[in-house]
Image (cartoon, rainbow, N blue to C red):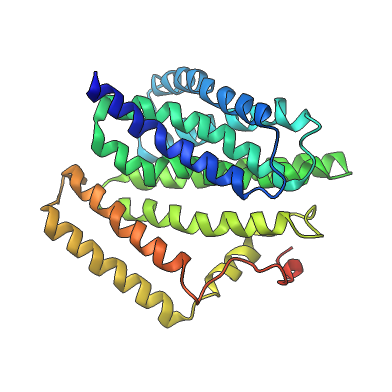
């Protein structure tokens, strides 16, 4: 009994922590009843997602690309997308662009929490630790970016343009989610890219978030401009130092855990847990570095549009 309770705690804790974090970050918090409603609907999304993914799995298509982009990415992000449009999008409380980000994150965390329970109960503590820093926040980050575009579409006066903006957000979410899964499904050291992607997406989400609070917030940001701004925050030597640091820390993780790569797959779950610590530490350093800040309030982001 204690073992099961502990597993459930590990499963639920990351989603609840992230939910509280994003809710408190919102300058104009949304109604708690609506937040709870969207979260619970997100939990229920796991049922049709499992059914659809099982059906697609029986079609005979195999490969990391198919499973990553079509089975997981497309199905899960489309279901979240429809939930946002059916529930919070039509509610009067949805009154600004930032609300799109919030409700999308809440829906995704409901989904991710239930999904996490299923994975952790089946695979144990190690998976719970790994997913707390990867899969659970990944759902929130991907859907949060999609929610930004839904928020912009909400206040777009031209109906057809609003549809295109929403479609852009959905496609972007599918692609980002698909790439994350693709790195994982590919095995070997490609797993590193999934960790790096989660870190980068934290940065990008807050660029979107800060823009949603600016005067010209109804005009969607251009993704190319965001990437240019993000990459340009460091000099070439700065990025080289970061890369070298990752390699050295990865070497330490491998040697201390005795992890090996066999047949294209990483053996020893401790290897992934060690990677969690590596990227968590790296992320903490970069997020608190004096050389990098999210878009400040005085920053003119018009050139990103």
In the picture provided, is 220 more to the left or to the right than 61?
right
Q: Is residue 46 visible?
A: yes
Q: Give coordinates of residue 193: x percent, y percent.
A: 37, 55
The number of discs equals 0
**Could you say which quadrant of the image residue 295 lies in?**
bottom right
Q: Is residue 116 above or below residue 170?
A: above
Q: Residue at x 19, y 64 (%)?
A: 251
Q: Give coordinates of residue 242: x percent, y percent.
A: 37, 72
In-front residue for pair 60/294: 294
Q: Is residue 221 visible?
A: no
**Could you say which quadrant of the image residue 303 lies in?**
bottom right
Quarter of the picture holding the C terminus: bottom right
In the current view of this chain or complex, which residue is farthest to the right? Answer: 157
Q: Is residue 7 above or below residue 165?
A: above
Quarter of the picture holding the N terminus: top left
Q: Residue at x 54, y 74 (%)?
A: 233
Q: Give coordinates of residue 216: x percent, y percent.
A: 81, 59
Q: Residue at x 48, y 81 (%)?
A: 235
Q: Residue at x 69, y 42 (%)?
A: 29
Q: Give coordinates of residue 276: x percent, y percent.
A: 31, 52
């Amino acid at each position: 009994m204690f073992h099961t309770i502990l597993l459930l705690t590990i499963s639920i804790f990351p989603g609840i922590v992230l939910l509280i974090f994003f809710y408190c970050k919102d300058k104009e918090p949304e109604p708690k009843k609506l937040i709870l409603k969207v979260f619970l609907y997100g939990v229920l999304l796991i049922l049709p997602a499992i059914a659809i993914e099982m059906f697609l799995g029986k079609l005979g298509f195999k490969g990391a690309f198919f499973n990553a982009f079509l089975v997981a990415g497309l199905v899960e992000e489309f279901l979240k997308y429809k939930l946002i449009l059916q529930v919070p999008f039509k509610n009067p409380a949805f009154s600004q662009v930032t609300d799109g980000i919030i409700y999308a994150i809440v829906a995704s965390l409901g989904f991710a929490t239930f999904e996490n329970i299923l994975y952790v109960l089946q695979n144990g503590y190690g998976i719970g630790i790994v997913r707390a820093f990867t899969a659970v926040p990944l759902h929130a980050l991907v859907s949060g970016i999609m929610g930004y575009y839904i928020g912009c579409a909400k206040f777009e006066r031209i109906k057809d343009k609003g549809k295109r903006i929403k479609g852009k957000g959905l496609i972007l979410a599918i692609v980002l989610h698909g790439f994350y899964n693709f790195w994982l499904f590919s095995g070997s050291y490609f797993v590193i890219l999934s960790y790096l992607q989660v870190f980068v997406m934290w940065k990008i989400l807050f660029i979107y978030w800060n823009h949603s609070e600016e005067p010209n917030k109804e005009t969607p940001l251009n993704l190319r401009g965001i990437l240019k701004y993000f990459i340009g925050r460091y000099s070439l030597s700065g990025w080289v130092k970061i890369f070298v640091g990752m390699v050295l820390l990865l070497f330490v993780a491998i040697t201390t855990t005795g992890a090996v790569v066999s047949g294209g797959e990483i053996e020893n779950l401790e290897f992934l847990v060690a990677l969690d610590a590596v990227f968590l530490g790296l992320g903490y350093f970069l997020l608190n570095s004096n050389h990098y800040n999210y878009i400040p309030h005085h920053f003119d982001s018009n050139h990103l549009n």
